[in-house]
Image: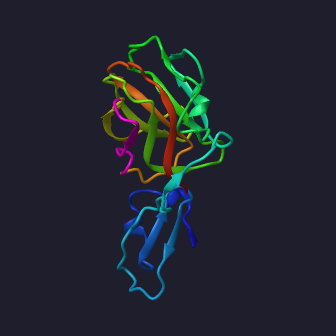
Amino acid sequence: MIDLAPALWSPAWPAIIRAASMEEIDRTNRKASFLPGMIPGCFGVRVAGCSCTPAYAIGDRSAVITVTTSGFAWSSGAPAEWVNGNTASSSGCFVSPDGSAVTGNELRFDLRPGNKIKITEAKAHLQGGGSGNSVWQWQGSDDGSSWTGIGPTFIFDQTVSVLTMTTLAGNSSGYRFYRMLGASGNLRHFFINEFEFQQCAC
């Protein structure tokens, strides 16, 4: 591993490095890996990413995920119950008042300090029978302040018992925070039992 001085970190790197073929650049740590035996002057660049393979984490994850919401009031229960492993009940975690607008409101999942988790799919276990037409987008953040959109917006279909959210499929980065940010529409009979995530640690 060769340490590249900060002064050299620029888009001009491919023109500067001629010693061997570059296999990988780690933009965060400014380090480059080289494949041995390659012809000097012939190289390609690949930015390092999160290459772990996600799998669904189920069961009680309340010790490692903190759930909060903004813009909503809950008639009973608490969003913390969305990661307690109980897909059949959330002790009445029901949004109030019924018909609440979602624009600008959020459901936030904090995967705790020091963690960078890649999520590529999510499931929401619902009571079903709802009629809301709310539209949301998944976003990720390292600090809980600056957010990056992940995939397009999607309709939160409350008529099903299990909603699988696939707009996260293109996510290739690990984040500490994830949130569902409301884009438009309203919640009606919004009763959530559990969230589950297809995830891995970067």
Rendered view: 196 above or below 3:
above
Main SS of residues in magenta: loop
Residue 131, quarter of the rendered image: top left
Tell me where residue 83 appears, x and y as whole percent. 58, 38
Q: Quadrant of the C terminus?
A: bottom right
Tell me where residue 106 appears, x and y as whole percent. 47, 26
Whether residue 147 is visible here, answered yes or no, is: no
Please provide the residue range marked out in magenta: 159-169
- Residue at 41% in and 78% down: 21
Is residue 119 rendered to the left or right of residue 131?
right
Tell me where residue 141 appears, x and y as whole percent. 51, 39
Is residue 48 rendered to the left or right of residue 3?
left
- Residue at 56% in and 49% down: 58
Along the line of sight, the residue nearer the viewer: 175 or 20: 175
Tell me where residue 107 appears, x and y as whole percent. 49, 29
Residue 143, quarter of the rendered image: top right
